[in-house]
Image (cartoon, rainbow, N blue to C red):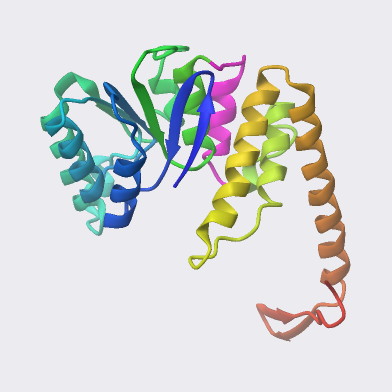
Amino acid sequence: MFKNIIATTTVLFSKFFSVSDREAVMMAVPDGVRRVLFVDTPATVELVETIRQLLSSGVEVVVRDHHDVTESELARGGRAGEIRKAAEEIRELLGQNALISNRISAPACSSLVWDGEFKGQEGLVIVADPDCDGLTAAMKAAGVWYEGLDEDAAVLDGPRTGQSAGTLSPLAWLLVRGLATLPPFDPARPQVAEGAKAALFGDFVAAVQGDTVALEGLGRKVEAYEMAVAEAVEVAKTARVIVPGVAEVDLRGRR
């Protein structure tokens, strides 16, 4: 879990797959909070329990999400039943405060939020999934919005192969390439990867608001990305096919 401030609103970025996820978020929610908005947080057992705890403390809870399953997905079985069950429990707990759609109806979670809908609300905390869809939805809710954000968010929440200079705004394309430069997640030292992502998200939010220093910071990450791509191209030239579909490259002597 990590935290950013968007406009004047505290935003906590977290998954809800484990007890430790829930405990970390509950510890990070400041005293005196009146309302918590969850955006792009998939319905899980731990999210349901988090909502129960907040409600029992007198906190109003709002959910905007697009991870519910379709009827065809539900018919195929697997985890779909668990997702639907958790989503129904959240709807029962929150009533009209729960808007849980699916990716077909709402390709991006930002489309489930009005521009600035929660802007400047006193005592509000936003909890979002720690990805680009969660970021853009939280930004829009807090009032940091730009023309084309919803379209960017839908592409950013899709396959990486569909993300390019031709499908994204210039700022979102900077964000994508910046993400590729972040250190890998290490369970033994989660703060390293989380801190780097928090800084990148912060630069993106600031750049959207016209901060030239933040924009330059994104540009430097892109330079690192382009260097890595060039190195990967050179490495790929040394690939040797072992058997059809499997190749190896020699990385000795490379940093």
Q: Is residue 151 magenta?
A: yes
x 77%, y 44%: residue: 221
Q: Which picture quadrant has residue 238?
A: bottom right
In the image, 55 versus 240, the foreground residue is 55
Q: Position of residue 136 (x, y in %)?
A: 52, 28
x 58%, y 54%: residue: 193
Q: Position of residue 34 (x, y in %)?
A: 26, 21
> Does residue 150 appear in this view?
yes
Q: Which picture quadrant has residue 126?
A: top left
Q: Position of residue 50 (x, y in %)?
A: 23, 41
Total count of labels? 0
x 20%, y 52%: residue: 82
In the image, 65 versus 55, the foreground residue is 55
Q: Is residue 200 left or right of residue 54?
A: right
Q: Position of residue 153 (x, y in %)?
A: 54, 30
Query: In which quadrant of the rendered image does the C terminus lie?
Result: bottom right
Magenta extent: 144-159
- In this view, 30 is above or below 249: above
In the image, 113 versus 183, the foreground residue is 183
x 81%, y 64%: residue: 232
Q: Is residue 141 left or right of residue 218?
A: left
- In this view, 120 is above or below 102: above
